[in-house]
Image: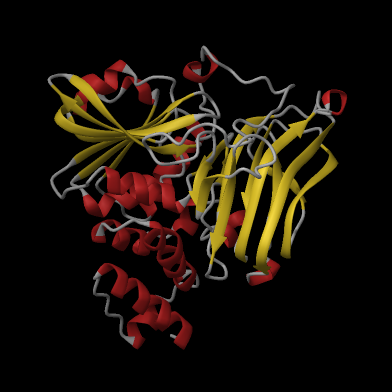
Amino acid sequence: MNRRAKTIIRGVILATGISVVVSSAEAQRHRDPFEQARRELVQNEIVGVGVTNKRVIESMINTKRHEFVPRHVRNMAYYDMALPIGDRQTISSPFIVAYMTECLDPQPTDRVLEIGTGSGYQAAVLSPLVKDVYTIEIVETLGRKSSAVLHRLRYNNVHTKIGDGFKGWPEHAPFDKIVVTCSPEKVPTPLVEQLKEGGLMVIPVGERYQQTMYLMRKVDGKLEREVLRPTLFVPMTGTAEESRLVAPDPTKPSIVNGSFEEDVKEDGFIPGWYYQRQAERVAADDSPDGKHHVLFRNLDAGRGSRVLQGLALDGRVVHEIELSTWVGVNKVVPGPEDALPRLMISFYDNQRSSLGQVWLGPWQGTFDWRKESRTVRVPARTREAIVRVGLFGATGEAKFDDVRINLPEAKSP
């Protein structure tokens, strides 16, 4: 084990209090080419952004995420990002898995129901923390694949089922905890009925691209809810998704709260934007559009500083868009791999596979507010997109306002 790996491990141990002793001989016998990347991910993107539960952190260190993603994206398994796993689904980002697991407060005697098995990664993380995990996947091919992976890796206390998760698993109810890794418009009634009195449920609820994660506790047969944070889960599969009352228009893409004028609510996060890292809504008289803008600050090269937002976008109808923003930077220095602030849009097809990305910027040094814009082609296979804005690992400060997507025929003056 090289000096860098030892330093990373020591940092995780000091931050969490976990004692991990691995002999050189054992390390050689069980050599894992992804171990260093996994520990670095845990240190920087999980411990470093607020997850403190020692048992959860240890499970994240020990769970081999690369086993749960397709081979062609294994080189990205230990980035804090969702990845396509086929059948229009993705594996959740490691931070979100760790965060949701911590919110469940997993105990060794718990029986946990998971709705939306997907790759099986969330169930694998839960497995050493609780007595039993019951997990349901509606997509048959994914359900079979994840069940095979969990069986091969000997997660023997994980019980899998293919079916409609929103109907729950009544023959094994009631459950101490429920975790939902897809986003309905409202909490399905069977899940409320199958949760024990006093039990906890973590669930994202909301519109297709505008969701809020809640921690809910069952009290006197009803759910009391606590707002956790804005979040973004990919659209669901099946009747629940098709019957949404509110659906986005993929022919008219737009940014929600692009001028950051909406008040920060009780969750402490900027409305409409997700996976906020080192970002702050700032009131300032010089904000170009309204009275507020977003400010990113980072002192540690490589550390995440960003927000993102998902949207529907149909490349068969929308052939090009204009990206625009007001931007200013202060003492910005490139981070690892020339990371610099920018406004970026990534395109995805109907299987959630990446079709590429384009951006405004990058910017560095120091300059005050200026307007930037660029017209870009939309790949014809595009069905949705993610907009990201931030420092992306650079150090210094960057501020943005009036982040927009304009259609060429409807450009703002």
Residue 159 lies, in percent from the top left, at 29, 39
Q: Where 94 sits versus 3, above or below?
A: above
Looking at the picture, tell me which residue is in the foreground, 140 or 413: 413
Q: Where 73 sits versus 184, above or below?
A: below
Is residue 9 left or right of 339 when viewed as pictured? left
The N terminus is located in which quarter? bottom left
Residue 93 lies, in percent from the top left, at 48, 49
Q: Quadrant of residue 198?
A: top left
Q: Is residue 252 visible?
A: yes
Q: Quadrant of residue 403?
A: top right
Looking at the picture, tell me which residue is in the foreground, 373 or 329: 329
Residue 254 lies, in percent from the top left, at 69, 28
Q: Quadrant of residue 362?
A: bottom right
Is residue 83 left or right of 165 when viewed as pictured? right
Is residue 161 left or right of 68 when viewed as pictured? left
Residue at the image point whose x is 68% and y is 62% from the top: 340
Looking at the picture, tell me which residue is in the foreground, 83 or 54: 54
Residue at the image point whose x is 26% and y is 57% from the top: 53
Q: Is residue 364 visible?
A: no
The C terminus is located in which quarter? top right
Residue 13 lies, in percent from the top left, at 30, 74
Looking at the picture, tell me which residue is in the foreground, 310 or 329: 329
Is residue 187 left or right of 334 when viewed as pictured? left
Residue at the image point whose x is 72% and y is 35% from the top: 404
